[in-house]
Image (cartoon, rainbow, N blue to C red):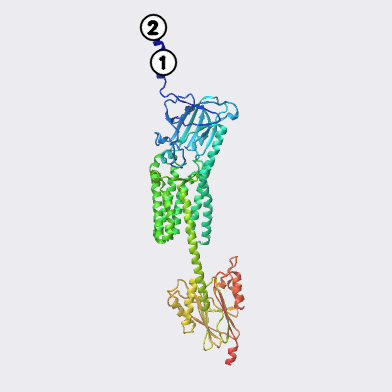
Amino acid sequence: MRRICFFLLLLPVLVLGSAAQNAPASSPAVAQITLGQSVVGLTGPWKFHIGDNQEWASPEFDDSGWSLMDLTSLPGSVDPNTGARGYVPGWTAHGYPGNAGYAWYRLRVNIEGTAAQGASQTLAIRMPDEFDDAYQIYVNGRLIGEFGKFTSRGIIYYDNRPVAFSLPANLPTGPVTIAIRMWMDPVTALLQEEAGGLHGAPDLGQASVIDALLRLHWEALYHSGASRFLEMAVQPLAMLIAFCLLWFDRGELAYLWLGLSCTVSFVFLTLSAAASYTTWITGDSFAWLALVALPPVQDGLWILFWGYWFRLGRTVQMKWLYRITWTCVLLLAVAACLLYRPLYGRIVPVHASVWLSPFADVLRGVLALILVWITYRGIRKDRTEGLLALPAAALVVVVLNGQYLRLLHVQTYYSFFGIVVPLAQIATVVSLGMITILMLRRFMQGQQQREQWKQEMEQARQMQSLLIPVTPPNTPGFAVESVYLPAQKVGGDFFRVAPGEDGSLLIVMGDVSGKGLKAAMTVSTIVGALRNEKTRQPAKVLRHLNGVLHGQISGFVTCCAALIAADGAMTIANAGHLAPYLNGKELTVEGCLPLGIVEEGSYQETSYSLAAGDRLTFISDGVVEATNEKRELFGFERVQAISHQPTQAIAEAAKKFGQEDDISVLSVTRTAKLKAVLA
């Protein structure tokens, strides 16, 4: 009896033990969740399986053979790509390296403590902010929402953002099956070591509380992106400054490349913000291609900017360097487009990324070396300016080699006042700050040079006023008037009035090609040569000047020389200058080549006779070439029509019409005074 009683007492235990042995070893677990006004994190462990089958959404499906995936984040974990905290590694770090495409998560929860009626009791689930790359979420086999578009032609997905979905309103309390169908781009699996699926746990709770959490997450997202918006605000300002500086100094091409770099950066930041906060830019759009193609272009523009900023010149070496730069940029942009959507997996084989990605890393390394070399040359050329630019250039080099920093586990995201800032944005801000300092320094140097230039121009003007006096010398028997209106402070026109002891008068008038200080220096040479010349014969005067100028100037000089005797006999020789006007009519003179072109010039003389009261007028081409707003020339007809007027009137008429070159007018009138004395 004792044995029978012991057996009867042991029988229930044996039956329960047998049932436990016959049950599946990994039967589905049910998470016990009590919901009031709280939110519960669905950390799992979740059941996980790679592949795709719509039957896996059904609550009746037996997932006992699936593996487990815990979505609990480790303390202090940080996303290596975005710097986000509370990060959970993806499935590639949980035993599925390199796996891409579809995978499913399943979790059974037992919901208690909430009624199934009333809008205030509606439940919602908030998905994590980080995931790869698109998903659909099912509750008890019913699709309640998706992120991305699952179409027959493929998956269209967007950049990650916080999303919440309401559970069915008639959901009863008790066991509920949540199934998540994930899809990951093959490129994401190849380029990110910890990619795949969810990188955080979903939250389940009352819809009102979930909505409040969602708003907080969006605020946090905007807060974390504050550095991006700040950079977006800075870039147009930098772009405006660069193009304004280029307008004022068109010879400084560094401003062009800086402005273009800021423009490309602003477009990239705008597209990036649109991709992060809206669904306007999808994973298969050309705007997404621009997102991956623009960074290499910006890197190339930065390199060109520093090359031109340091004024390394347009040598053959630098031309080849720029060609290599743009070749690398073009190849990088093409590689980026091939590796990313929408081209990858459609026209490019999957295994292409095995060599495309390292190839792109090598190209970035080449660009970094080019920038290092340019900075080194800049330091050697201008030590102070080069050292000021060194921090900015060094940060750009570091950003170009960001892939190696991640391999070395070097932090590429930094937090300032709760705002996570990537190293690339730090490099941009520092670069723009240093460039501002450099531009201010160069502006101050330019101001000093301009002040020095003004002083030199004023000195040149004073020197030229001594060489070409406003008041002509005393010329018995002749009335001389002259007007000189340079287009700048100093000019290239010249004339000399030299009375002789025999009562004759030598007139030399000419025009140096070009304007400004260089032309003025040539004028000083010519006037000095005229003062030292003893002969007064016009042809010999021109030959003497030609010998002085040939081989010493890069341009040429037009010149007309006339010797008027006391009795009115005039000999004139012309070297490419405008013929003078006699009493309103243009004289016919022999034309010869301008001075300074050939070593041995031949100049023909023409003879005329001036009667008492005859007026001879010499002009420079600045009178004829005056141009109005309609781009009409003053022309020879207008000149001839007013050639008999006083010199001041002729000069003012040309200036008012539209002066573009130096204006010189000189007139000689033979008087009867000397003639009467001689009689």
**Residue 150 image position (x, y, % from top left):** 50, 34
Callout 2: helix, strand or loop? loop
What is the three-letter code of the residue carrying label 1? Val
Q: On the rendered image, what quadrant is the C terminus found in?
A: bottom right
Q: Which residue corresponds to the image point at 54% horizontal and 26% vertical from the top-left? A: 113
Q: Few, some or many C-alpha atoms within 10 Å of disc 1 (few <14, some 14-19, many ≥20)?
A: few
Earlier in the chain: of badge 1 and badge 2, it is 2
Left or right side of 139 for 400: left
**Residue 420 image position (x, y, % from top left):** 48, 44
- Is 90 rendered above or below residue 679? above
Q: CA distance from mark 1 to mark 2?
A: 19 Å
Q: What residue is shown with label 2?
A: 1
Q: What residue is shown with label 1?
A: 13
What is the three-letter code of the residue carrying label 2? Met
Callout 1: helix, strand or loop? helix
**Residue 406 image position (x, y, % from top left):** 40, 44
Q: Which residue corresponds to the image point at 60% horizontal and 80% vertical from the top-left? A: 583
In this orientation, does residue 339 appear?
A: yes
In this orientation, does residue 314 appear?
A: no
Residue 187 found in image quarter: top left
Q: Nearer the viewer, residue 59 or 45?
A: 45
Question: Mark 1 against mark 2, which lies toward the viewer?
Answer: 2
- Is 23 rendered above or below residue 317? above
Residue 382 found in image quarter: bottom left
| Residue farthest along the top direction in this orientation | 1
**Residue 612 image position (x, y, % from top left):** 60, 86
Q: Few, some or many C-alpha atoms within 10 Å of disc 2 (few <14, some 14-19, many ≥20)?
A: few
